[in-house]
Amino acid sequence: METISSEKDNRKVAVLSSFDKYTTFSIGGTTLTFRTCDGLERYTEVKLWDAGYIEVMAKYIHEPQEIEEYIDLDPVLEDLYMDKESFLSQIREVRIEYA
């Protein structure tokens, strides 16, 4: 079994996180930051990544159970006048990461 780890491979993994009232989505030195719902404590699991559409589990301060959430990056990328195809095509996986 061979494990390959390089900067090029790392660009294929995007990182989803949150702070205060914002969500961040980062890959290859580019970070998108956008407003999210009040009370979001943290994202806990990525259930699905589908070329700009993310299905995640999230923990909210006011809810005892995790809630399934959906994030669509298309409108965010459009608002930033970014080339969706170019940006999204480099992503193979999304993981959650908190410092």
Image (cartoon, helix red, strand yellow):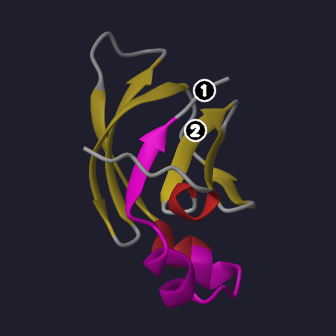
Q: Residue 21 falls in which quadrant of the image?
A: top right
Q: Is residue 77 above or below residue 50?
A: below
Q: Position of residue 74 (x, y in %)?
A: 48, 77
> Which type of secondary structure does the marked residue at label 1 adopt?
loop
Between the C-alphas of marks 1 and 2, the distance is: 6 Å
Instruction: Assess disc 1: are there few (<14), some (14-19) or many (≥20) residues with their C-alpha within 10 Å of its C-alpha.
Output: few
Q: Position of residue 36 (x, y in %)?
A: 57, 45
Report the residue marked by disc 1: 98
Q: Mark 1 or 2 closer to N-term?
A: 2
Q: Quadrant of the C terminus?
A: top right
Q: Residue 52 falls in which quadrant of the image?
A: bottom left
Residue 40 magenta-highlighted: no
Magenta residue span: 77-96
Report the residue marked by disc 2: 17
Asked if labels 2 and 1 touch by Cβ distance under 8 angstroms, the answer is yes
Q: Nearer the viewer, residue 96 or 77?
A: 96
Residue projecting furthest to the right: 29
